[in-house]
Image: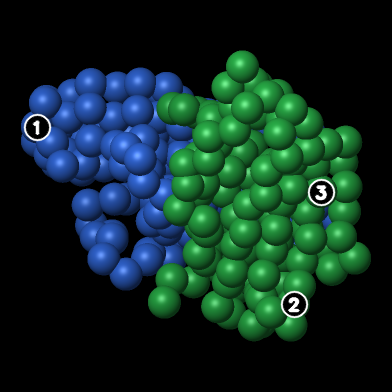
Amino acid sequence: RKEVEQDPGPFNVPEGATVAFNCTYSNSASQSFFWYRQDCRKEPKLLMSVYSSGNEDGRFTAQLNRASQYISLLIRDSKLSDSATYLCVVGGFKTIFGAGTRLFVKA
Amino acid sequence: GAVVSQHPSRVICKSGTSVKIECRSLDFQATTMFWYRQFPKQSLMLMATSNEGSKATYEQGVEKDKFLINHASLTLSTLTVTSAHPEDSSFYICSARDRPGLKNYNEQFFGPGTRLTVL
């Protein structure tokens, strides 16, 4: 089993759609959780940290369920500019990146 | 936010040559830097963790004699790919983490990456 697993994707959605990404992790001792965004041929950039209480930043909502070892990212009202690969990242002794889920938002 | 630079951004070299990639934290001191490699359409794979003033910790399967890492100061880590071969062609990305105890300690700040092509 991979240490961090994400939906395989790709997700193809129309503008304005709501899209949800899921991620599971295997190490129950993991301490920090993030969603990063990576555009084609660019470095990853932090989108948001994920907290047990859930957190929201504009159209983006992230949630963490420690009991189920599950992280989610919800994007509302998708924009063309949201097209990218979204990486689930789990930190602890080591930082582990998920393989990423590719999102295509179309007009 | 914290800025990490990487140099060069792109390098093309002949098989058998060595290539050095620099990673600098510009506005913060990074006791820990990470080196990743990413092949096309694949995930970031951690190669090694570089700690200032001590030897790097390499991930399983990464040859330490081939990928030399030096973290001589709190703002600079270098990765040298020795005797590069075509299969070493990849996107190499470094990241840096701020000092322990700071609020954003667990966040990693990424450099823009170096695209290495070995002919």
State whether residue A54 is above or below residue B14.
below
| Amino acid type, callout 3 | Thr
Disc assigned to residue A101: none
User: Is B72 on the left-hand or right-hand side of B82?
Assistant: right
Q: Could you tell me how far apart the alpha carbons at marks 2 and 3 are, in whole angstroms?
A: 17 Å
Instruction: Mark 2 or mark 3: name the one nearer the start of the chain.
Output: 3
Same chain, marks 3 and 1? no
The percent position of residue B15, horizontal first and vertical second, equals 9, 32
In the rendered image, what is the letter of the chain coloured green? A
The percent position of residue B90, horizontal first and vertical second, equals 29, 37
Disc assigned to residue B15: 1
Same chain, marks 2 and 3? yes
| Amino acid type, callout 2 | Arg
User: Is A93 on the left-hand or right-hand side of B40?
Assistant: right
Residue depicted at x 35% and y 40%: B41
The residue that mark 3 highlights is A61
In the rendered image, what is the letter of the chain coloured blue? B
Give yes or no for contact between labels 2 and 1 (Cβ–Cβ under 8 Å). no
The chain to which mark 2 is attached is A
Is residue A15 at least partly visible in the picture?
yes
Is residue B55 at least partly visible in the picture?
no
Element under disc 3? strand
Depth check: give the residue in front, A68 or A97: A68
The chain to which mark 1 is attached is B
Res A38 → quadrant: top right
The residue that mark 2 highlights is A66
